[in-house]
Image (cartoon, rainbow, N blue to C red):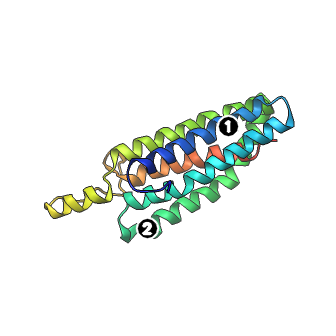
Amino acid sequence: MLNDPGRSRRRVAVGGYTTTAILSAAIGAAAAPWQAGVFAAGAWAARGLRVPDRNALLADIVPPAVYGRAYGFERAMDNLGAIGGPLLAIALVALVGVRAAIGLSVIPGLLAALAVIYAIRHTATARQRVSQASLGGTAPRLWAWPPSRAGFGYWGVLLTLVDVVRDTLCARRL
């Protein structure tokens, strides 16, 4: 299975974000409708592969007591992007044109992949949190301010916002 624990989950999530960004941006360079269709199908397949692994990573990072908050926040930001993203896309198309705007969608897509990598490297996994608690340590703060002391909460916000903008720009291609 693609979402087995361990490194494969991280690789699939990061690979899914990266592949989605590149293939979605490639639509702007397509010379024929069938090419745009192939790029779009590949991007949607990559998006479909990354979602279970992203959700599993989110479950690994947050304690069970805040699953509802974490998943609810992720869904809320996705819906916010569904509203704000098209407005951003309209402004971008007005400034640089349709093909260039589609091509520029690679930037937030790659930022989302980098945010996933950063979040993976800088937050404790479930196993690390249990081990810290058993040694008398404290688990990282999840929804803290300032961001320098925050755990997944701050980086989850950043990742979700970047992901929402990228998905919205890519989904509203033509």
Report the Cα–Cα distance between label 2 and label 1.
Answer: 31 Å
The quarter of the displayed image where residue 62 is located: bottom left
Q: Is residue 45 above or below residue 73?
A: above
Q: Would residue 37 be found to the left or right of residue 140 on screen? A: right
Q: Would residue 29 be found to the left or right of residue 56 on screen? A: right
Are the residues flagged by discs 2 and 1 in contact, CB closer than 8 Å?
no
The quarter of the displayed image where residue 40 is located: top right
At 56% from the left and 55% from the top, the residue drawn is 51
How crowded pointer 2 is (Cα within 10 Å; few <14, some 14-19, many 20+) is rated as some
Give the percent coordinates (x, y) of residue 164: 61, 49
Q: Which residue is mark 2?
A: 67
Residue 23 has which mark?
1
Give the percent coordinates (x, y) of residue 66: 40, 68
Q: Is residue 82 above or below residue 28?
A: below
Q: Earlier in the sequence, mark 2 or mark 1?
A: 1
Please state, as top left, top right, bottom left or bottom right, where the C terminus lies in the image: top right
